Amino acid sequence: MRIFLWHGYLLRGTGSNEYTSALARTLIAQGHDVTVFCQDPDAAEVDLGGCEVVRPTLPGRLPVFVLDNYSDAHPALVADFTDAELTAYVAANAEAIRAAGPADLLIANHLILGGPVAAATGLPFIVKAHGSELEYAMRGDPRLCTWASESVRNSLRIVAGSEHIKRVVLDLLDVDPGQVSVIPPGVDTAEMRPRPADEALAGLLRESAADVTGDERLPDPDNAQRFAAFFAETSPPRVLYVGKISEEKGVPLLIDALGHRPAIVVGFGPARAALEAQAGPQVIFTGPLQHRHLQYLWPLMDVSVVPSVFPEAFGMVAAEAAACGCPPLVADHSGLAEIAAGVRSFYPPRLAHLAAFPTGDAAALTERLREYADLNPQDAELMSAGARTAAERLWSWDSVAQRLLALVTPD
């Protein structure tokens, strides 16, 4: 099939960005002809499996759901755009897609603005809903909800990454429930896998030594030296956080619950400076890392915490941690609860509660981390193996791509 994949943003760093890159690689590997439309000026540096990349020319500002820094675009919250600005944005992107020629299928990310862009092309299309547009932009905004509903009504399918996101879509949009299919995001279980500690540490130090640094979207400049010291000077259980460093993601809650336990906090965001000052010397902040780092970091850690207090579409970092044999410990809500249910089913019943903690409950998180500290080596290995099995059986990119295409191709 000739497949167009539209994503209005970058190709690294956040859930929908990584989703786009991984799906493109997988579809290319499965033999499809894929073109990616995005706004990443450094797309050539991203592994997309060799597919073509087109960067549409914007008529003005870039509509976003959460304000971040872009090197050569001017982001503004989508709710602050006039109807005329949004119309011009959609027209520019649709024109770029039509100029690329015919396609069998367009897969568009985000109900807003992917839905309107896809509808304007006239191509058969699927829309992938993400939690960001639903919670940060559309909820409480009838204008955007109505526009999304009208745009996606003629789509072949709306794809939600979890049952939680499906419920939110149906709560906010006026669409047929039968049009919404649940297909979770995928994990590259060949890249993300358990590794011996010496191999993992060597790989992490090698990748960190090769880093290009310079701004908040890049790794910190001294990570290789700090990683070497961290693993030489600390002992299990070592705690990992990967994601945006913000109040919504629950990072302050995690810092409060850590006590004196060693931890690594990966990511960037508005709360970094304050939390880094608050955390003890046993906690290191690394800036954002890529999969080339994380495939080695997760196997070295004993628990990967996802403490978000805001609804999450799925919890990709938890699934990737599980694939690496690092048990995820997640806040028990929204799409994260579905991750917890998945790994829990492969844990011994007496350890199943260690998959999650009540949302926003610092005392409960502290207690779970204490229980991780008290695990004997045999139980720790059972949880690591169970997490890996859950990832292999429940999440993989090959299965995600196949299930997406099965929605629109006959048996």
Image (spheres, helix red, strand yellow):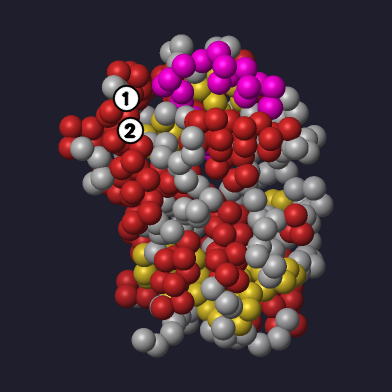
Per the image, label 2 sits on a secondary structure element best described as helix
Q: Is residue 79 left or right of residue 89?
A: left
Depth check: give the residue in front, 231 or 278: 231
Residue drawn at point x = 56 percent, y = 83 percent: 1
Question: Is residue 228 one of those drawn in magenta?
Answer: yes
Is residue 210 in view from this perspective? yes
Residue 100: image location, x then y, percent: 73, 81
> To which residue does mark 1 refer?
377
User: Relative to residue 259, is residue 39 depicted above or below?
Assistant: below
Depth check: give the residue in front, 29 or 406: 29
Question: Is residue 345 one of those drawn in magenta?
Answer: no
CA neighbours of label 2 inside 10 A, class few (<14), some (14 to 19), many (20+): some
The span shown in magenta is 223-248
Per the image, label 1 sits on a secondary structure element best described as helix
Q: Assess whether mark 2 and mark 1 are in contact (beta carbons under 8 angstroms).
A: yes
User: Relative to residue 9, is residue 198 depicted above or below?
Assistant: above
> To which residue does mark 2 refer?
381
